[in-house]
Structure formats: C-alpha cells, structure tokens
Amino acid sequence: MSMALRGEFDLRKADTLGVGQPVCAVLLARAGEDHTELLSNLNVAADVEVRTVDRVLWPLDAGQPANGAPDLLLVDTDGAAAEDLDFLRKLKAGHGAAPAPVVALVERDGEYATEQARRAGADAAIQKPVTADKLREVFTRLGTGNWSHDRTPGSDSNVLVFMHVTGGAGATTLAVNIGCALSQAVPHQETCLLDLDIQFGSSANFLDLSRVSPILEFLEDPGRIDPELLEGMLVQHPSGLRVLTSPGLPVPLAALASSGVADLLRVAKSRYRNIVVDLPVALAPWTDTLLRSATVIYLVTPVTVPAAHRVRKFFDLLRSEGLAHLPVKVVVNRFDLPLKSPVDISPSQFSEAIGRSLHHMIPDDYRLISLSQDQGTPAVRMKAKSRFSIAIEQMIDIDVMGRKSTRNARKFGFLNL
C-alpha cells in the first residue's frame, strides 16, 4: 500500500534531489505484523511518502520498485537473526534497489542487536517500539546526506586510524608524531588527534599536555556533540595539533556507543581536514564504526612470530565480518637489520605468514623515542632529520599528500624487504 504522511516537521530531500519533494521510503515489513504505530510515528516525525512491501516479495536480485528507487529503506528486523543480517548485507550490496540509506528497526534486545545491524550494513538502527523523536533525529541526519560515509560534510577529510593487536607496538607513538608532523607540514589544513583509548590512552603524556579533555561530558551524553562542544574538549599542542585526550581515569570501553563515535567523527570531519585516531589494543563494539570511516587504517606491529599470529587472526576476523575491503596498511615498527631476537622473523616471512604486504617500515630509533617520551616532545620536533622522522614524512607523502616520497629510505638501512 502507499500513503502520504505529513506532520509538523518537514524533512526534505537534499538540493540535488529537488527541494520541496517529500522523501520516498519503503518499509520492508515482516508478513502479518502490525505497523500501525510505526506509520503513525512517521506521520508525526516527518514528511515521508511510505510504501509498505512484504520483505519476501522485495526484488533482491534485479529490478526496481514500480515508482522508482526509494530515498530510504526501513527494514523490519530482529537484528540478531542470521537471515535478517544477510538481508541487510544484500540490501547494502545494491540488490533490488539503487544505493539508498538503510534504517534497521530492531527488537529491544539491548545495544548488541543494533550493533549487529550496523555491522551488517545498516546506516542507522532504531530499537522498537520506534518513537517519533528517534525517527525525527535519524531522518534529519539521513535527509541531509549524512547517512553515507562518503557523502558526509567534510568527506574530503583524511581519517587516519592507528590500531594494534599486540601490546607495546608503538601505535600511539606513530599517531602522535603523524599528527604533529601534519600540523607543521600543512598548517592551513588543521589536524586533530582523537585518543579513543579511553582506558589507558597516553597521548597527553607523550605530548606533555597540561590538562586532559573533559570527555566524560561527551560519554554521558554523546548526542550533545557539536562543533562548539568538540572545540571545548580539545587541548592544543604547541605544534598546532588539537588533541582529544583520554579521560583522567579509565572508563569501560562500552561507555562509548557506535552512534556516539559516528557523531564524534562526523563533527570532527566538518571542522578538520586531517583526523588522526588512536585506538585501544582491544576490539570494542564501536571499533568497526571507525574502521568503516577510515581513509587509511594503520595496523602497527613488530616483526615477531607472536605478532604474526595475532595479525593473521585479525585479518581472518575482517574477512568473516565482510570487511576485507577496508584500507588496512601494515606498518612494521621498530625494525632494523640484522634481526636481534630468536622470535624475530624476516619481513618477507612475516608478510607470507599474515598473507598481506607490508606497507611501511619504521626504523628502531630507541634512544630518540625514549628521550621524546621522557620529555613529552614528539620525535619529529626534536630531530626532524632522523631516520624515524623521515619515515613519518614518507607516510604523509604517500598516504595523505598522495605523492611519491622524495626520500630514499633504502639508504638509511631500514627498508630491506
């Protein structure tokens, strides 16, 4: 059936879709379920033309709706059922409709159900019963084009995510130095660092910052995030880098929700050209939200046998979650020849063990990095011509500036694959 629902809140298509036209939504419903309350809330929440279609009848493999592709897909699902998650994946793959934002309507089984729906590809997930206020919030975001990672304001921003799957890999050291180097190299394109290791993040110590960000306000009410609140939480470093530090005391990783992380990143992208993100070693429910939004994901690792097992396991996880396409680059940190330990393996052996190429080799400059951390001064500011600083410059040249590095790394003896 089809009906025009109008209310006091007008949601209009983006200008490119034609100002003043109502949004066309398709509700992919479960057979035999009553959606009267949902349709009533749509009436209150927005100006939406809704067409209800039995999910079983939706053309997944070919064809379009009779009156054209929808602007929005509402999917009735319990969030955790394997067939429902597979249905969401197929929708996001473009089967049966042109690309359109997908809103999953899930049973109230806790946040895990919404997380599963998001990981399966839903652009938003709302727990049932669906309220008019929640619909209004989600539709406002989707209606302004914020539903797609590559269509958000600031979509030309660089999001550089640093992660590690083994302790002591040095990911924070690289994140801090990349952030400061970017701030110095491109001062007119401002850079911020988001330390999302909310339990044991150390960026504030590495940068000798005098205070920590009041991030607890954001954790308590992530829906409040806007450019003004973000700016108030950031601490400025002398290099020009703006830093969202971790809390003064550890908080559970679950204190962050995927929706809050997505909103934080959206606001950061509206203000900053370069966004560096430092992640905890543990995988949180919101980790994939960041990974899906990244321009580059740096997986920082030593070249050892134990690290090879962990890195391989991580890539196996990505494949099992349908995330093998993510822009992951393997960064070998603290590497020098000759090999110094029985557990060390050669770069070529490590690459073969993990089934991936190695993209960057960062030299072992223990003395410089130790001095840098003791003094709270980034190594790239202490010694700009060091082998470490040159390697950081290469990463920026290749991955951010999009140009071939002018430096010859081989002459420094640390790139020897």
Image: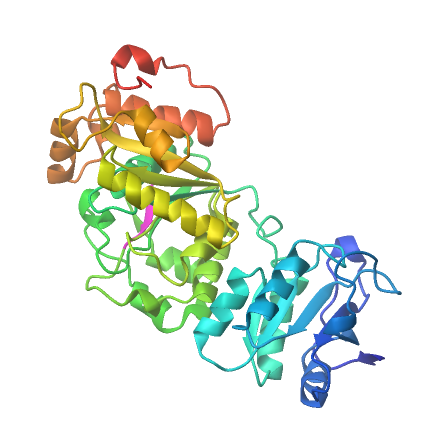
Residue situated furthest right in the rendering:
66
| Quadrant of the frame with the N terminus | bottom right
Q: Coloured how?
A: rainbow
Q: Nearer the viewer, residue 136 or 29?
A: 29
232 to the left or right of 368: right
The picture places residue 184, in percent across and down from the top left corner, at 35, 31
Quarter the C terminus occupies: top left
- Residue closer to the observer: 96 or 11: 96
Q: Residue 102 vs residue 285: left or right?
A: right
Residue at the spot 73% in from the left edge and 82% down from the top edge: 31
Residue 70 vs 149, above or below: the answer is below
Displayed quadrant of residue 297: top left
Q: Is residue 307 visible?
A: yes
Q: Which residue: 72% across, 89% down?
A: 36
- Magenta stretch encompasses residue 204: no
The image position of residue 96, as x and y in percent, is 76, 59
The x and y percentages for residue 361 are 31, 26
Query: Percent x, y for residue 233?
Result: 34, 58
Q: What number of labels is visible?
A: 0
Highlighted range, magenta: 241-245
- The residue depicted at 82 percent of the width and 66 percent of the height is 21
Q: Is any part of residue 181 visible from this angle?
A: no
Looking at the image, residue 131 sits to the left or right of residue 9; the answer is left
Eyeballing the image, is 222 above or below 196?
below
* Main SS class of the magenta portion in the image: strand
